[in-house]
Amino acid sequence: MFGDWCAAVVEVAEGRLAGGPDAEAFARLSGYVHLMAENTAADTERRGCLLAKGAAELAQGDPAVAGRSAETMTALLSLLRTEISAAGWRHCC
């Protein structure tokens, strides 16, 4: 389940952030951040991101969770860096 959740998180980010004209990079970033904020605010039953909660609670004692969390965060950061660079903020990250 945790691996599936991580894959879905990256898949959503790829769908929102991966590629496209540089002129549209800021709009992609803005849309992605707003989507994540809206989803987080609307999720009143789970109260948080499974990736963040899993990493915080389990990664220290479970190498599989630690590895999957690290892979997922690396993929997300790569996508965000690419979009930030495309938007012209080359000194940001």
Image (cartoon, rainbow, N blue to C red):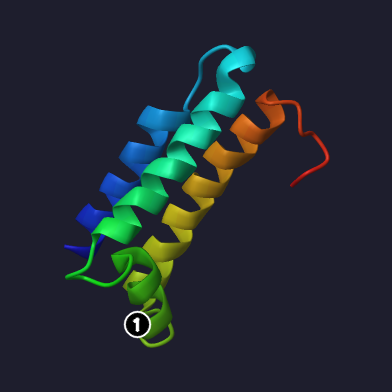
Residue 41 spot, x, y in % from top left: 33, 59
8 or 47: which is nearer to us? 47
Q: Quadrant of residue 43?
A: bottom left
Question: Residue 65: where, in percent of width, then height?
Answer: 34, 71
For image coordinates 52% across by 35% down, the residue present is: 30
- In the picture shown, does residue 40 fall above or below 87? below
Q: Quadrant of residue 40?
A: bottom left
Q: Nearer the viewer, residue 49 or 37?
A: 37
Q: Dot 1: few (<14), some (14–19), or many (≥20) neighbours within 10 Å?
A: some
Q: Give the side of residue 87 with respect to residue 34, left or right.
A: right
Question: In what quadrant of the picture does the N terminus appear?
Answer: bottom left
Amino acid found under the numbered disc labelled 1: Leu
Q: Secondary structure at mark 1?
A: helix
Q: In the image, is 18 to the left or to the right of 65?
A: right
Residue 36 image offset from top left, x and y in percent: 39, 49
Nearer to us in this view, 42 or 24: 42
Q: Is residue 56 above or below residue 30?
A: below
> Which residue does the image show at 59% across and 23% down from the upper left?
25
How many numbered marks are there? 1
Quadrant in the rendering for residue 66: bottom left
Residue at figure coordinates x 48%, y 56% from the top left = 73
Q: Which residue is mark 1?
A: 58
Relative to 5, 52 lies left or right: right
Q: Nearer the viewer, residue 43 or 83?
A: 43
